[in-house]
Amino acid sequence: MARAELTTVETVHDERSWLFTVADDYGNEEEVILLPCEESVEAWVNTCPHEFQRFDRGMGAAMRDGQVICPKHGSMFDTCSGDCDNGEAAGTTLVDVGLAVDDGTVYLDDEDYVFRHEGGIDDTDDGPSSTSHLSF
């Protein structure tokens, strides 16, 4: 699958997280978050492996001291390694997604996924779903 341009390292560091949606070979969609890691970024499936809670629900992921925080139990995962050593998720690791970074631009570079769109699974720019022809 072709590399897809996502955003910039600078944007991820400024916003603290960046959410996008991918699909696998069967069309199943998955949310992925980009998180700052030292001078670069890492990509993780947007789900706590303990109880499958989304880290970023469309408003950014909660972060503290280089760790992303599970909104349900407060377990914290290292943004660089994906490892958790505390709380109810201790001993688990986030599922990684392949990236490439060229000259500050971040690309999805994972043969298992194709880029769908920025934002969460339910975030699309398809316009209003109403079929009403009323105008005000």
Image (tube, helix red, strand yellow):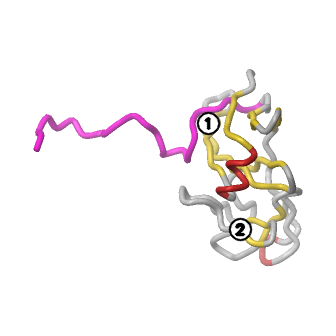
Please state if 68 lies on the left or on the right of 117 as rendered.
right
Label 1 SS: loop
Residues at marks 1 and 2, CA–CA distance in whole angstroms: 28 Å
Total marks drawn? Answer: 2
Residue 114 included in the magenta stretch of the image: yes
Residue 105 in the image, given as x and y percentages of width and height? 75, 36
Label 2 SS: strand
Q: Could you tell me which quadrant the N terminus lies in?
A: top right
Which is closer to the viewer, label 1 or label 2? 2
Nearer to the camera, 72 or 127: 127
Question: Who's the residue at 82% across and 32% down the image?
Answer: 102
Please state if 125 lies on the left or on the right of 23 as rendered.
left
Residue 85 included in the magenta stretch of the image: no
Question: Who's the residue at 55% across and 47% down the image?
Answer: 120
Q: In the picture shown, does residue 115 fall above or below 58?
A: above
N-terminal label among 1 and 2: 1
Q: Main secondary structure of the magenta part?
A: loop
| Location of residue 24 (image quadrant) | top right
Residue 18 in the image, given as x and y percentages of width and height? 65, 50
- Characterize the local packing of mark 1: few (<14), some (14-19) or many (20 or more) Cα atoms within 10 angstroms: few
Q: Which mark is residue 63?
A: 2
Q: In the picture shown, does residue 9 fall above or below 68?
A: above
Residue 111 in the image, given as x and y percentages of width and height? 79, 28
Q: Is residue 8 visible?
A: yes
* Amino acid type, callout 2: Met
| Location of residue 68 (image quadrant) | bottom right
Residue, disc 1: 28
Q: In the picture shown, does residue 128 fall above or below 14?
A: above
Please state if 82 lies on the left or on the right of 134 as rendered.
right
Which residues lie in the magenta part? 112-136
Question: Who's the residue at 31% across and 39% down the image?
Answer: 128
Question: Who's the residue at 84% across and 63% down the image?
Answer: 78
